[in-house]
Amino acid sequence: MFPVNDQTTSWEFCDLSGQKRKFLPQDVPVHTRSMDLQRNKLKRVTGISRFPFLVQLNLSRNKIMEFPHELINLQKLEELYLNQNNIRHIPEGIFPNLRRLKFLKLSTNRLTKLPSDINQGTCITYLDLSKNCLKDIQPLVGLTKLKELFVKKNELTELPSQLFHNGTCELTVCKAMGNPLRCPPEEVCAGGVMDIQSYFQHMDENPNTRSAWTVKTMFLGCSMAGKSTLCRSLREGKPVAIAVEDRTEGIEISQLYAEGIRFLFWDFAGQEEYYLTHHVFITPRALVILTVDLASYSIVDPQSFNDQLWFWINNIQLRVPDSVVLLVGTHCDQCTDQEEVMEKKKDIEEKVNSRLANRRTVLKQQKRNLEENANPSLFTDQLDELDCLLEYNLKVLDLITIDCTKMEDIGKLRSHVLTCIQSESVFLCSGCILPKSYETVSQAIHTLVALQKIPQHGIIQLEELRDLILNHVKLSSESLKTILQSLLRYLHRIGVIIWYEDISVLSDRVFIQPSFLISMFKTIVRHDLVQQLEGVSRDLLMQEGALVKEKFTWVDDLRCRGTLHNAAMRILVRRAIEKLIKDDDDLVEEVVGTKREEGIILTLLQHFEVCLPTLVGGGLNPHAPVFTPSEKQWKSASEAKRDPNGACLFPIYLQDELIVCQKWGENRQDDLSVHVYFLPEIPHGFFHRVIVKTCSLYQTHWVGREQCLLCCGNRLCLVRQKKRDEDPFIEIRCRRPEKDEEFRQLWDLILAVISKLFVLSRQWPGLTQQIHTPCPETGCPHYFTWRDWQELNNADFYNLVKGEKLVCKGGHTRRTELLFPKDKHMSL
């Protein structure tokens, strides 16, 4: 952070980081220009005015509670780091004296407001205020040289339009994700400064705008809990009976307009095989209606609560922790009497509140454990992540009981849902303000669908959609381009359309009819896939150029190996398409793919780590890149190519661990072992994605339902999901090498897996991780906790721990390289 360059002598740069200091040192030369005091125990910064020549000052990752008033005397200061402290207030009068300040980092504090004179820091070009509690950033107006602004994860509902005026704005970067923004909506901000400027320009041109009240409503719950009945009854406004054979497969989408609010109903299937696709389509800031079958719910059986409620609530708070959950008890008519209904309602509410409170208690205790470490400054990032989890506030509303056969109960539920929307509107971002031009473009899309200008299946090229819209609106091509991208992000979030902007091979397509895409998904990820394969006719096989006996091979491979041949996938998806749309060979090829090229479905399944493609290639590649932990974009060492005519492994369909156990054998006491714990717990389906992520690194691997074995040269790495004392974790295990110089290669392998786990965990905002190395001594319960490591460079990975040997709390001594990444040759 503070490099010593050719113009900076050693006495001008003072590195005092990570020294557990509670006070500023007395023996530092007053002419010091750079001072690094990060990762200490400072609560106040007294005496900093003794260093008037400071240009750079790093006070991050301390315990500072008050903004240092003495900073007014550091008039040469250009860079100031105060991130990751506990600052709640900045006094007036500081920034008018910091005329040279260019870089200011105040992220991860407790700021609720900004001083009115912060805009007098007229040289500030970089400002990071992320992860605070700010509700207003109007005081920033006037920072005319500001180029980069970060305000992620605050409580902002609006951004000041004056910050983005074309004539005075020098901003090139503005990051505002994670706020309940209404003006502009978060989806506009995701497009960057130019999209925000365009938004405010359109707002100025048409000030008579109104809020667009649209709420994505997701129906979740176990199979046969009454989700579809509830969804359709709400939509129709009267009881609707659903036959067992008509139960939801995958996801069904419908709409409801009520009292000026548009509801987008997403009815998710409850069978376990469909859970993996839930991850693909569940989006933040939604209303979740969680249905519970009260007739089958048991007060005395703990598993009943876990299966019918806590499984769903837990996965919601891990994936979309800023949602609102409404509990709805169904099948009341099948309960003995009203007393039973009310008794179960009370039991459910008490258990939910108890579990949510217990979750916070566990997180707080984990935080205390890290704070009580000998040097807590080494765990600042992990402490910050725990703080973030504690700040998330999944809202679980009281359970409402209904009898879906009664008209009055359907009306009662509809009124209750409307009340919830109005009371939680900020939380749900349901009242986003859109310029008139955005509404015009949105309406044009609806008109194009009604006029059948867009194909029935709804898949259309982005450029083609833009050209069609231009014929229906009075906008320039460039203006429409900016509007359309922001609008598509917004419509994607609320569930109207699907646009995978982040998937490069699909970013040029828009799915105007999400239900069509979902129907394609559920042809592959479904509870009765074996039966579907067995039912493939000879005529369909002949279209693919396959024999009947090949079908039996496909069925056997799916049952025994969890492998689905691409040819079988193409047949299943083609059959589903032809049931919906006749005589569209181009569509079939685009969605299904060919023997030469992957289609949309296979691309999406692989992108979301639902399956792992087979790889075609030769032996080991002597020119493969070396894994470097600090390189976030490191790719697989294999140069092999995917084979569209091959097969895909679906870990969810695996039944056992036999092949992995045979290849690995028994654990050994001297194995290298690392445990990665996920708090509050491992999400459902997470480990299946771990298998896909890690196996993509190495061409040779063996896979079981709860573990996989990776092979890199002559080195093996076992990755498996385990549970100890009710704490689930993922273990990474390697054999101890015969030669000391081989330790580096093994730790490279372990770090490669850890890095993939970290990347994958980012998809669950309500999740954090801790890494432990257990003591290898048989029966010893003690372990070593890893320090913060995500921001380390490559050399520091192998210097996590000083010293040649370590002693656990039980008194057992081991060489450091058996417990942590260590490269003796690098240390010399």
Image (cartoon, rainbow, N blue to C red):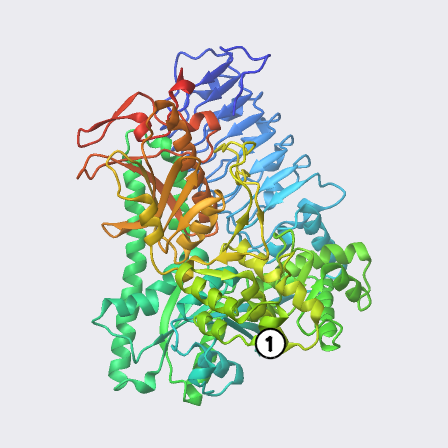
Taking the spot 62% from the left edge, 64% from the top edge, the residue there is 592
Viewer-nearest residue: 544 or 80:
544
Could one spot residue 266 in this view of the protein? no
The spot of residue 766 in percent (x, y) is 42, 52
Q: Quadrant of residue 750?
A: top left
- Which kind of residue does numbered mark 1 sit on? Asp
Q: Is residue 186 left or right of residue 166?
A: left
Viewer-nearest residue: 238 or 253:
253
Q: Residues within 10 Å of mark 1 (few under 14, many from 20)?
A: few
The spot of residue 497 in percent (x, y) is 62, 66
Q: Is residue 255 above or below residue 10?
A: below
Taking the spot 62% from the left edge, 37% from the top edge, the residue there is 119
Taking the spot 49% from the left edge, 33% from the top edge, the residue there is 627
Could one spot residue 111 in this view of the protein? yes
Q: Is residue 383 above or below residue 218?
A: above
Viewer-nearest residue: 719 or 29:
719
For the C terminus, the quadrant is top left
- Give the residue number, with chain letter if any, for mark 1: 539
Viewer-nearest residue: 550 or 103:
550
The spot of residue 104 in percent (x, y) is 55, 32
Q: Is residue 192 left or right of residue 772?
A: right
Q: Is residue 478 left or right of residue 241?
A: right
Q: Is residue 267 above or below residue 604?
A: below
Q: Is residue 728 left or right of residue 580?
A: left
